Amino acid sequence: MRIARAEHSRRHFLGRLGAATVAALLAGCDAASRSAWLPKVLGVGERASRSAQRLASSRRSMAQEFSPADLSPQFRSNGTANPDNPEYQALAATHFADWRLKIDGLVERPLKLSLQELRAMASRTQITRHDCVEGWSAIGQWTGVPLSAVLRLAVPRPQARYVVFHCADPMDAQGTLYYESIDFDDAYHPQTILAYELNGALLPIANGAPLRVRIERQLGYKMAKYLMRIELVSSFANIGAGNGGYWEDQGYEWYAGI
Ligand SMILES: Nc1nc2c(c(=O)[nH]1)N[C@H]1C(S)=C(S)[C@@H](COP(=O)(O)O)O[C@H]1N2
Ligand SMILES: [Mo]
């Protein structure tokens, strides 16, 4: 019953993904991203059944990891490239020395962590492929702290079901800030990291400095950049328009599995 419903919404989403991807291809992306994306576009049917299989078995599988030779020459930026937000700009001016990641909501121990504190924690480095719904892909190397380690420090309360990422960038004239959310399956997945480095260098502002999340088995829009706050909730009914993310509020699927 649950699987049937998930599969229904997945097909709906893949239909839309196909149209968006074809539009992007017609608009002309560069050859590298086209070749990385094309097999997946052509294999939509195959993808749907593979995803159904994954849903039926486990969501704990690992995303493919690559070698340094596979790295894209450049990891492009998409969406916001520099938040139009005075508070963020002030933090950026001092290289995020005064930035703190807040972790609150349904936790026993609310936290405020500096970049230095996050960097002092055990890190994980992974080379993965990022797939954007707009029809481009790029392979990059990410280094950061596993989200699971940060959650363990904060001690989630039993009622907590989702992890909400609040970002610094306003998306519209009303100042709606980008936000996203994932469930605990993804939050505790070993490849879900809060990344502060891209390709061995400090995370550029264009890619989400000082901190962005990597959720490697989902599409690019889930991977919130410019993180300011992580909130644990039992439901996202009262966050944004209630669909779990900025793009979800515009009609995108909440679970954007690849
Ligand atoms: N805060 C924030 N996070 C965001 C976005 C954004 O506009 N703002 N865009 C999303 C989309 S659609 C993609 S594909 C990736 C792009 O990441 P990149 O800029 O590192 O390529 O970030 C995602 N996370
Ligand atoms: Mo995207």
Image (cartoon, rainbow, N blue to C red):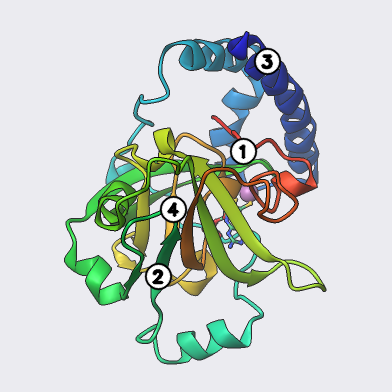
* Residue under numbered circle 3: 5
Q: Is residue 40 above or below residue 224?
A: above
For this rendering, which residue is in front, 24 or 86? 86
Select label 4 or label 2 by which is in front: 4
Whether the residues at callouts 3 and 4 have beta carbons within 8 Å, the answer is no
Residue 243 position, x and y percent, is 70, 43
Q: How far separated are the C-alphas under marks 2 and 1?
A: 36 Å
Mark 4 within 8 Å of ligand 1, using the beta carbon: no
Q: Where is mark 1, residue-wise? A: 34
The residue tagged 2 is 101
x and y percent of residue 120 in the render?
A: 17, 68
Picture quadrant where residue 108 is located: bottom left
* Residue 216 in sight: yes
Amino acid type, callout 2 = Leu
Instruction: Report the residue at 60% width, 48% height from top.
Output: 221
- Residue 42 drawn above or below residue 168: above
Pair 2/1: label in front: 2
- Viewer-closest of 185 and 90: 185
Badge 2: how crowded within 10 Å, few (<14), some, or many (20+)?
A: some
Question: Which mark is first along the chain, 2 or 3?
Answer: 3
Q: Which residue is mark 4?
A: 106
